[in-house]
Amino acid sequence: MFSPVESDQGFNFKPELPTSSAYYRLLKKLRRQVGHAIRDYKMIEDGDKVMVCISGGKDSYTLLDILLQFKRIAPIHFDVVAVNLDQKQPGFPEDVLPRYLEENNIPYYILEKDTYSITKRLTPEGKTYCAVCSRLRRGSLYGFAQEIGATKVALGHHRDDILATFFLNLFHGGSLKAMPPKLLSSDKKNMLIRPLAYVEEKDIIKYAQMRQFPIIPCNLCGSQENLQRAIINDMLREWDNAHPKRLHSIFGALQNVSPSQLADRELFDFEALDSEREFDFKGSYSHENEDGQSNRINMVNLGYAAD
């Protein structure tokens, strides 16, 4: 085991691994969930080069850590490389990620691009930075993935991120969509994977604390108030506290879609239902007799009969 190495900020760049039973139970749970997600959506295959986008947050640290463990024990061979986009935010501690990655012998690249200034310039007054920032970040990282020959781009979005995106689109976008665990980029050049798709945020928080990752907070969007995503996240946490199985059920619904029970005419051909109908009429329940009077068929009151 290694002794912790502390920086001026008090970070442990190579702390001793936890030995508690709680840690190993949590690790086993995360490995199982990540493994199931990889299997269910065929995220990683033999010979893949997986580019893990690492921001310095708890999610991307956890993703990188779990994938590196799978690399050591998996029956297939795949490579993992960490890539960070230094967006030139004022006060960003540029030494933290390189030091962590080097001291843990993790292959990495630091991609420097001043998307911070561009985001600040392009975002209208009073609007949030997220849309512009994420678009610029994606463009830079996806292009770099092509340069280094990465066959998969791994993102650190977890289950609660996926649910929050679903409700953001439902409440504010007028659409039923979220973040898929696996996605082909719009230019058809990059395959995006989200191995943490089954993992709950609260478990990532616990894991990051146990592993003592040197967390770098986001001072761009994280400093803005009244973000709709933050409001949605608060709602999800309240639901989780009051109804522990609710979020699990909602995520299950995203995997169990019935297009014929919705109203999207592009997704389901409602017009074709007429041609599929099978007629089996035995006659009319009511008709007029020769005198023009309507005959009635008396129906049994089932509720009364049951009594």
Image (spheres, grey):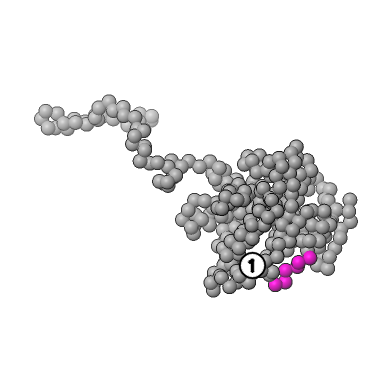
Which quadrant holds residue 238? bottom right
Q: Looking at the image, is 254 positioned above or below residue 90?
A: above
Instruction: Name which residue lies at 38% across and 30% down.
Output: 307
Structural crowding at the residue carrying mark 1, measured as other residues with C-alpha within 10 Å and reported as few (<14), some (14–19) or many (≥20):
many
Under circle 1, the secondary element is helix
Q: Which residues are magenta?
A: 90-95
Residue closest to the far left: 291
Which quadrant holds residue 299? top left
Residue 265 visible, this orientation: yes
Q: Looking at the image, is 275 positioned above or below residue 7?
A: above
Q: Looking at the image, is 78 positioned above or below residue 241?
A: above
Instruction: Name which residue lies at 68% across and 43% down.
Output: 44
| Residue 277 left/right relative to 185 | left
Q: Position of residue 130 (x, y in %)?
A: 59, 64
| Residue 290 left/right relative to 241 | left
| Residue 65 left/right relative to 262 | right
Q: Position of residue 166 (x, y in %)?
A: 54, 53
Residue 240 visible, this orientation: no
Q: Main secondary structure of the magenta part?
A: loop
Is residue 219 in the magenta section?
Answer: no
In the image, what residue type sits under mark 1? Answer: Thr
Q: Position of residue 230 (x, y in %)?
A: 59, 61
Instruction: Name which residue lies at 72% across and 71% down.
Output: 91
The residue pinned by badge 1 equals: 115
Q: Position of residue 98 (x, y in %)?
A: 78, 61
| Count of number-bearing discs | 1
Instruction: Name which residue lies at 69% across and 69% down.
Output: 88
